Amino acid sequence: MMEARAALTVDAVRIREVGPRDGLQVEAPLSVEDRIRLIEALVAAGLKTIEAVAFVSPKAVPSMADAEKVVALLPKLDGVTWVGLVPNRKGAEMALDAGLDAISVTLSASEGYNQRNVRMSVDDSIDQLRDICGLAGEAWVEAVLSCSFGSPYEGDIAPSEVAAVARRCMDAGATALTLADTTGMATPRRIEEVLAATGTRVGLHLHDTRGTALLNAHTAYLAGVRDFDTAVGGLGGSPFAEGATGNLATEDLVYLMEDLGVETGVDLDRLLDASRLVAELVGHPVPSRVAAAGPRLNNPA
Amino acid sequence: MMEARAALTVDAVRIREVGPRDGLQVEAPLSVEDRIRLIEALVAAGLKTIEAVAFVSPKAVPSMADAEKVVALLPKLDGVTWVGLVPNRKGAEMALDAGLDAISVTLSASEGYNQRNVRMSVDDSIDQLRDICGLAGEAWVEAVLSCSFGSPYEGDIAPSEVAAVARRCMDAGATALTLADTTGMATPRRIEEVLAATGTRVGLHLHDTRGTALLNAHTAYLAGVRDFDTAVGGLGGSPFAEGATGNLATEDLVYLMEDLGVETGVDLDRLLDASRLVAELVGHPVPSRVAAAGPRLNNPA
């Protein structure tokens, strides 16, 4: 289904780091300067696609305020793509005006979650996605489909229904599509069932609510998926879905892929520096166990 | 290699619950009565093989003191096997005298860990295992091989070396063998490499130090392993290996297997009761994410 994603010529995965956005959105607000420090540490670790900001209501999500200020301070670097999440056309206009060259449009396979998260029906979200794709010109527009592996509101959503919404997003002009497991309801079986319906040229955005994020990523990798969203430290969660917890940790996925001999382009030691930084900035330990324990052969004896 | 384990006739896994032993050994000591309350809650959840005690030095591991008192109070139930862990011949004599019908003998594929954990060489451990098998009569003797997927002391241990020690344990008379990932160094690749050398008729004892326990269990399940040690709540760790953290949580494995349609004999709701009980007894939340979030379709909305 995802013609927009080119096949990789080596055994590699592409990571979209969402820590500065999804990772921070449920934390107490950080200063713009600290958000930039974190972003710079992620760049230093080798991350090439970074979701840096969200253009959302600062009243609803205070820690995502000042997106324009963050964008203005992003380092200008060849080969690094800066992404902003947007919930609607207005957010997309702000993101494009700010000069971002990639946007993630959040919508959902779940009517209940879509209403709570972006305050409109799925149909209206797809209409706005079409408008956004019209505005976007050369900018990359990723449609991110929340609750693709189950919804806290409707329960399981049929894989054919997820695939139908995904198809409508691509028909509306999206460059690519990510399936999100917003509240950690994915399991290996659900991953395989949904991918059988959508194809594997999709990105996956996984949460570790039930301890299955890394297992689901591995299952999807074996099925052929090569695009993953992760957040440094495993921070994260949705402010609009109770019980939603951290993202798949970037360090956990990089650790696994290194062991499998799969390229990520990320230096795990420098990533652990970024992980220590984010723990210091948010003022509490991060969920990632690799962050706590270190890589397997650096275990303290 | 493991001729002693009969093939299962249905798609099922066997769980040996080690929470009352491995789960509690690094916690502050509980009263004998509370240890029995936990064990009764685990039986009520449907667990049929429970490692209830360890016959080890109460000075070295204070929370495992009073093993005989616990054994004397174990409910007499058909179809439930009570297991005691022993580090040496003396411990085995105490376990058999107490009336246990199954013992786990802990030894290691790592000389460094074996010396620290049971204060003897691997050769001496295998000699004592042979003596123990001679004493055991009809009792089940499980050899549990620590650090089978890597050692904090020697690093990686060649799969052929792990398999050679495993073979020596079986030749010494062990009924069955479990490969333990004491400090969470296993990865899917290591699991496959070691199982290729040992065969899959082994049990696995996994720790979640680097967030890979459930992924490793799933990898091993797909390879053919059907015997898993788990601890309620994901509590646990070795007092003799710094950085060792919790076991694969029973609720996490049961949750995964239920989703895969694989029988465990365990009722997840009642298991979550046991999980809440153990959190209350140890006085802190347990690591299991399924314990925190509940099953996928019970997600709070």
Image (tube, coloured by chain):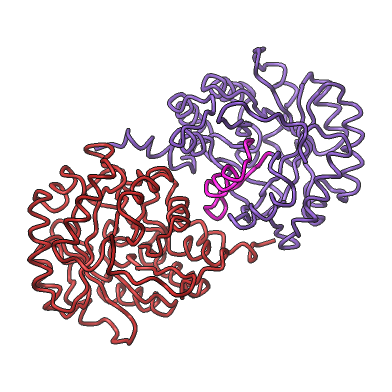
Chain colours: A red, B purple
Q: Position of residue A16 (x, y in %)?
A: 35, 68
- On the image, which quarter does residue A202 sit in? bottom left
Q: Is residue A150 above or below residue A176?
A: above
Describe residue A84's horizontal placement relative to residue B84 as left or right: left
- On the image, which quarter does residue A299 sit in? bottom right
Q: Residue at x 52, y 60 (%)?
A: A290
Residue B217 lies in the magenta-colored region: yes
Describe residue A239's horizontal placement relative to residue B198 as left or right: left
Q: Is residue B191 above or below residue A72?
A: above
**Magenta residues (range):** B203-227
Q: Quadrant of the C terminus of chain B?
A: top left
Work out whether residue A200 or residue B158 is closer to the camera in this orientation and state it.
A200
Q: Residue at x 24, y 54 (%)?
A: A145
Q: Position of residue A252 (x, y in %)?
A: 48, 60
Residue B219 lies in the magenta-colored region: yes
Q: Position of residue B63 (x, y in %)?
A: 67, 35
Describe residue B108's horizontal placement relative to residue B53 as left or right: right
Q: Residue at x 17, y 51 (%)?
A: A117
Work out whether residue A227 or residue B207 is closer to the camera in this orientation and state it.
A227
Work out whether residue A225 or residue A24 is closer to the camera in this orientation and state it.
A225
Q: Is residue B190 above or below residue A263?
A: above
Q: Quadrant of the N terminus of chain B?
A: top right
Q: Position of residue A38 (x, y in %)?
A: 36, 73
- On the image, which quarter does residue B35 sit in? top right
